[in-house]
Amino acid sequence: MSDKKIRVVHYINQFYAGIGGEEKADVPPSEQEGVVGPGLALKTALGNEAEVVATVICGDSYFNENLEEASKTVVEMIKKHNPDVVVAGPAFNAGRYGVACGAVAKAVLDQLGIPVVSGMFPENPGVDMYRKYAYIVETGNSAASMRQAIPQIAKLVIKLGKGEPMGTAAEEGYMERGVRKNIFVEKRGSMRAVEMLVAKLNDQPFITEYPMPSFDRVQPGKAIADVSKAKIALVTSGGIVPKGNPDRIESSSASKFGKYDIAGVSDLTADTYETAHGGYDPTYANTDADRVLPVDVLREMEAEGKIGELHRYYYATVGNGTSVANAAKFAKEIAAQLVADGVDAVILTST
Amino acid sequence: MVKEIERTGIPVVHMCTVVPISLTVGANRIVPTVAIPHPLGNPALNKADEKDLRRKLVERALRALETPVEEQTVFDK
């Protein structure tokens, strides 16, 4: 191994490849020899021990809308270059990019048996969905943390490429994968447990050997007996706002939500509504916002008596890099108002 | 957001394109949609066909709200 460089294939999205932003998020997979975009920094961090032999690129929307086919094509492209390790991302807090990196990791590990290193912000949905399949380094929520993320990723790549034993998540700086590993230790379990308990009672720090998973699941709401008598409200994370965005909802990392009166509105048009969302190509929503918030058909169905009533207000925020804490806070306030207004059911649309 | 609203007992149907994210987030009634930038539309269709497509998806969402579920359910038909 010492005279041979570790071969690395790098997976990135259309944005980091310099192809374009959201308007190019639908480009299918492609490949290039050598490094592209952030691959340059990766190459520097890897030094003489490893080489980025190729870069595989795919648009984030394309990947997520064609999960199976896109993963298959990407895996074929990666396989051709015979890598020892694959790097995906880092994706920071970009949700679709994180999911794509995770799906690539899973496919590469399952089908090729090659380890994958990635980097994401802890709230990226890609972390929870795919943590088992990759060594995911914790990054900040934007590319501003690229400089810290890349050396950490490079360190793990070299370790995996050399086949050195991987330490625990805390020791090595990746996010817990939920993988249990048997090890030999000096002290028996009962002793370790008592020591932990004593530490806990004394408010001393201790590290559990088996963290309990925390599932925050909510019971499904009771089915509506008859929608033709129900008051239905619309909520969206797709950023649909009255033209001009009166509340100035941010295009990413939203700090607020909007509540908008749609009494008498039967169609959202290019002159009256638009999207404030900066995380997808806005062309389609700006042309016809009903494509995200279906006011037109619900109004029709209300007139036909198919639903009881379309609630007078709809609620909107921008779910682009918005923290889970903020989204939960907005939704709590929205929920309290929906209950007070006697809403029976909610249609929530996401982009 | 789906969860915080449903916590009050009001049933929520989540209409979105990337179903795996919705499942991870914890939505209980999920209707898969067309594409990320136009979940409830398709600019390739003419106006009437597009509206018809949207209406079918909304009807499916309403049916999901009328359907008792015990666990996460994807309404893809």
Image (spheres, coloured by chain):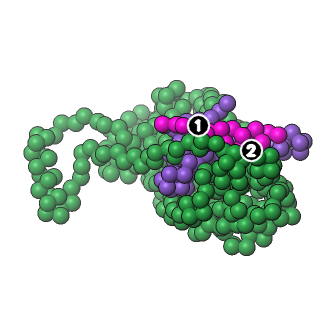
**Left-right relation of A171 to A273:** left
Whole-percent x, y for residue A339 in the image: 55, 60
Query: Which residue is identified by label 1?
Result: B67
Q: Are marks 2 and 1 on the same chain?
A: no
Q: Is residue A167 left or right of residue B20?
A: left
Q: Colour of chain A?
A: green
Instruction: Write the start and end of the magenta stretch as one range.
Output: B52-70
x and y percentages locating residue A59 in the rendered image: 69, 44
- In the rendered view, would you say A235 is above or below A242? above
Does the segment drawn in magenta span residue A73? no
Q: Amino acid at mark 2?
A: Lys
Secondary structure, magenta segment, majority class: helix
Q: Is residue A10 left or right of residue B58?
A: left
Q: Secondary structure at mark 2?
A: loop
Q: Is residue A98 visible?
A: no
At x 14%, y 53%, the residue is A197
Circle 2 crowding by C-alpha within 10 Å: few under 14, some 14–19, many from 20 = some
Say which of A268 and A197 sits in front: A268
- Classify mark 1: helix, strand or loop: loop
Please identify which colour was used for chain B in the image.
Answer: purple
The label shown at residue A282 is none
| Chain of the residue under the numbered disc 2 shown in the image | A
Single out the residue that lies furthest toward the top.
A111
Residue position for label 2: A306
Question: Dot 1, how many residues are within 10 Å of its Cα: few (below 14), some (14-19), or many (20+)?
Answer: some
